[in-house]
Image: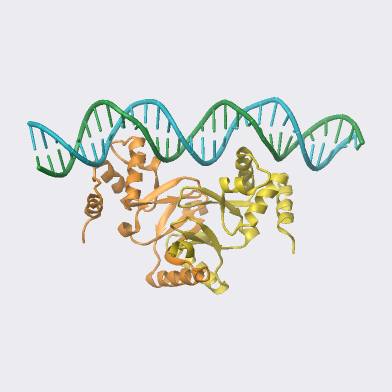
Chain colours: A orange, B yellow, C cyan, D green
Amino acid sequence: MVGLHAKVEKSLRSQGVRYTTNRRALIEALNNTAGPLTVEELYRMTEPRIPYSSIYRDVRVLTDTQVLTLHHSADRSNRFELAEWLSGHHHHLVCVPCMAISDVSLPPDSERRLARLAESAAAASGYRVTGHSLEIEGLCPDCDS
Amino acid sequence: MVGLHAKVEKSLRSQGVRYTTNRRALIEALNNTAGPLTVEELYRMTEPRIPYSSIYRDVRVLTDTQVLTLHHSADRSNRFELAEWLSGHHHHLVCVPCMAISDVSLPPDSERRLARLAESAAAASGYRVTGHSLEIEGLCPDCDS
DNA sequence: AACAATTTGATAATCATTATCATCATATAT
DNA sequence: ATATATGATGATAATGATTATCAAATTGTT
């Protein structure tokens, strides 16, 4: 069982990209959070502060190298998260009032059913399905009370 | 069975908003397309041309009044579509290479199963679920060949 | 240590989107 | 119908997020 940073480093090196302190800090911040983060949140969460220009460049590099994936949320903000091969397959729970997003995993049988369901829904259109992602909207306990 | 424009007009009027020629043209363009559209696509699809400043203002007004909903796609572009109460509940089929997005509906029993699945996935987190949306990724017949 | 390649941070440039405002169109009241 | 009020339009300017630039610093390699 290899650690996260080792996996990331190996992947980046194989692509001729260095795993620097800044990038490690960004990955660390994402790994400590149960949901995708905005550039601004990454800025606030890293210590010492990484300038915005560097964060923007790094999340782009990390996205281009498949270490991160970009996620667009309903408040028009871009958020980044660890790619599926690093964090495991999961879905999102979105709180509509407060816009918080948290990861949620389905039990294996539900996940299988969902995958089959996606397959058959796409069948008529002639698509070849490569993935799926479920977004569940609602109110978090805080907003619901 | 009341027409789309009549429904939209009634809703807008009740909110003190006028259903003008420009807005009607935007709704018409969206209704003639099986998927969400960008501002640029709306610009190209309407005749005579509506200036960007007006399109931006109108899609905002229409979104604020619940006639449209905003959708963020993986190419970082914002797309608009008719709200669910006008177009019916549906999901999205996204072609990863060419970024085309088309609507897809599930058969009623699949839809029920999906809704139940979303419910139970959220249960542990204490969320109150109000909706869900499935995005199916893949390759459209064109990109697959 | 010397060299090559990549990264960094400061800054400027770009792009999509939003705000402003004078003019125009539509609705309502007289 | 005409007057008046309200909302909409389109041209343009302003904003804000993101990306590009580039000299200096860092890291990896010989």
Q: Position of residue B137 (x, y in %)?
A: 45, 61
Q: Position of residue C5 (x, y in %)?
A: 22, 41
Is residue A99 something that shows in the picture? Answer: yes
Is residue B130 something that shows in the picture? Answer: no
The residue at 64%/57% (across/down) is B32
Q: Position of residue A61 (x, y in %)?
A: 32, 45
B52 or B59: nearer the viewer = B52
B9 or A99: nearer the viewer = B9
B12 lies left or right of A101: right
B4 or D28: nearer the viewer = D28
Q: Is residue B17 above or below residue B102?
A: above
Q: Quadrant of the C terminus of chain B?
A: bottom left
The quadrant holding residue B34 is bottom right
The residue at 72%/45% (across/down) is B21
Q: Is residue B29 above or below residue D21?
A: below
The residue at 63%/39% (across/down) is B51
Total residue callouts: 0
A23 lies left or right of B36: left
B51 lies left or right of A97: right
Q: Position of residue D10 (x, y in %)?
A: 67, 35
Farthest-out residue, front:
B145
